[in-house]
Every structure is written in structure tokens, then in C-alpha cells.
Image (cartoon, rainbow, N blue to C red):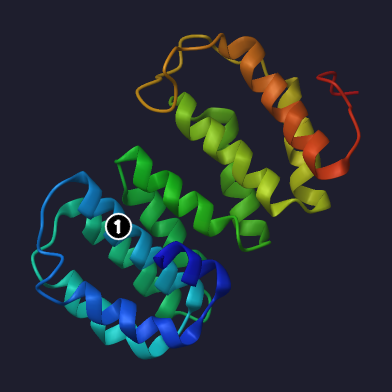
């Protein structure tokens, strides 16, 4: 339900979702609860109603787990900053938990911003983590403008190492030497409706 409200950007739902965050009802622990809370926080960011800022701050200050603290900070930045990109890039640099870094990248990719594209290209080309490289590539695909697509194409010049860290993101580790060029080609195909293959030229 929170995810649907977020996709609809249904403003009347924002105070209801914010109240739920700080009610005693969701005081259950465990992964399902944490997932629901994070989806609720993400929905509040999508709805973008600044009137719930105090409620999110109150939730952040209530002794929640580090992973939920990270999510709440990410949402607060979006609710309070006219230009959240510098703050989000700062969170990305400080965060070490890769699933939360992926959430930050997804948020950044909603901004068709040169600062974001530059950071994602750097990550796609140089991260030691295969998961982070993939998230950066998908982030560039979501930005989807000419600059980002040309940056994606430029990554086809790279020789991807097969020894990248793969702690997250795969049930079975693929051959990254072919996986990443194929993924880049797929992203270009999705955005342009043309099949360019994996040859940079």
C-alpha cells in the first residue's frame, strides 16, 4: 500500500504514513517490518509533502536500526533540500552498506544532473564491487538522456575484471567480462529501441 501511494504521489496519504511510522503498532522487529518501513519512507519521499518532515525526523531520533536511520536520512534530504543532489552524493560516499547505497543511487538517478551522471560513470568504471557497478549502470539507464547514454556507450571500451567483489546481487556469480558489456547493450537498447551490440564504435 505505501508503494502504491508513493507511485501515485497521493498527498493525502502522507500524514497517514508518517503517523504510522511513529505509532506503537509497527514496533515488531525483523526483516518484513524493516522492509515495510523502508517502503513507507520511500513513499513519503515520492509524495514529497514537506509537512511530514518533523514526523520523519522524530522517527529518525527514536532509536531505530542503522539501516533504517540511513533510509530516514535519505528521505529527509529529499523533503528539506531544494537541491538534494549534494547531500545525496555525500550520503553515497559515507555509506558502506551496499543495498542502501543502491537505494541512494536509485534516488540520485531521478535527477537528470551532470553531477549525478559523472559520479555514476566513475562508479561503473572503477568500483571494486560488481553490485555497485551494476547499480551505477542501471542508474545511468534511468537518467536516460543523451549524455548518460553516451557515457554508457563509453564503458564498452573497458575490460571488466572477473575478480570483482560480488557479495550482493547474484545467486550465481556470472562472468563479468561478458555480463557488463551485455548489460550496457541491453540498457542502450531499452532506451533507444535500437540494438547497437557491444562494440563501442
Q: Residue at x 24, y 48 (%)?
A: 32
Q: Secondary structure beneath disc 1?
A: helix
Check the picture and name the quadrant holding the C terminus: top right
Q: Residue at x 75, y 23 (%)?
A: 156
Left or right position of 188 against 104: right
Is disc 1 surrounded by few (<14), some (14 to 19) or many (20+) residues within 10 Å?
Answer: some
The image shows residue 79, relative to residue 39, as above or below, that is below
Q: Is residue 184 visible?
A: yes
Residue nearer the viewer, 27 or 186 = 27
Q: Position of residue 77 (x, y in %)?
A: 39, 72
Left or right position of 199 against 52: right
Check the picture and name the quadrant holding the N terminus: bottom left
Left or right position of 112 against 193: left
Res 134 → quadrant: top right
Q: Which residue is denoted by mark 1 in the rendering?
A: 36
Q: Position of residue 171 (x, y in %)?
A: 41, 18
The image shows residue 171, relative to residue 150, as above or below, that is above
Amino acid at each position: 500500500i505505501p508503494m502504491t501511494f508513493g507511485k501515485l504521489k497521493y498527498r493525502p496519504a502522507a500524514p497517514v504514513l508518517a503517523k504510522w511510522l511513529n505509532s506503537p503498532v509497527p514496533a515488531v522487529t525483523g526483516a518484513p517490518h524493516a522492509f515495510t518501513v523502508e517502503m513507507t519512507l520511500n513513499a513519503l519521499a515520492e509524495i514529497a509533502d514537506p509537512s511530514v518532515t518533523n514526523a520523519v525526523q522524530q522517527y529518525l531520533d527514536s532509536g531505530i536500526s542503522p539501516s533504517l536511520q540511513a533510509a530516514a536520512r535519505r528521505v529527509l534530504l529529499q523533503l528539506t533540500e531544494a537541491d538534494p543532489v549534494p547531500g545525496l552524493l555525500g550520503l553515497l560516499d559515507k555509506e558502506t552498506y551496499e543495498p542502501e547505497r543502491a537505494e541512494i543511487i536509485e534516488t540520485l538517478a531521478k535527477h537528470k544532473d551532470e553531477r549525478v551522471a559523472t559520479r555514476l560513470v566513475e562508479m561503473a568504471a572503477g568500483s571494486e564491487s560488481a553490485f555497485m557497478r551494476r547499480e551505477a549502470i542501471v542508474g545511468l539507464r534511468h537518467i536516460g538522456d543523451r549524455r548518460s547514454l553516451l557515457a554508457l556507450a563509453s564503458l564498452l571500451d573497458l575490460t571488466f575484471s572477473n575478480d570483482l567483489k560480488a557479495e550482493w546481487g547474484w545467486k550465481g556469480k556470472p562472468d563479468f567480462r561478458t555480463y557488463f558489456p551485455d548489460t550496457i547493450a541491453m540498457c542502450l537498447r531499452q532506451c533507444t529501441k535500437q540494438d547497437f551490440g557491444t562494440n563501442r564504435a
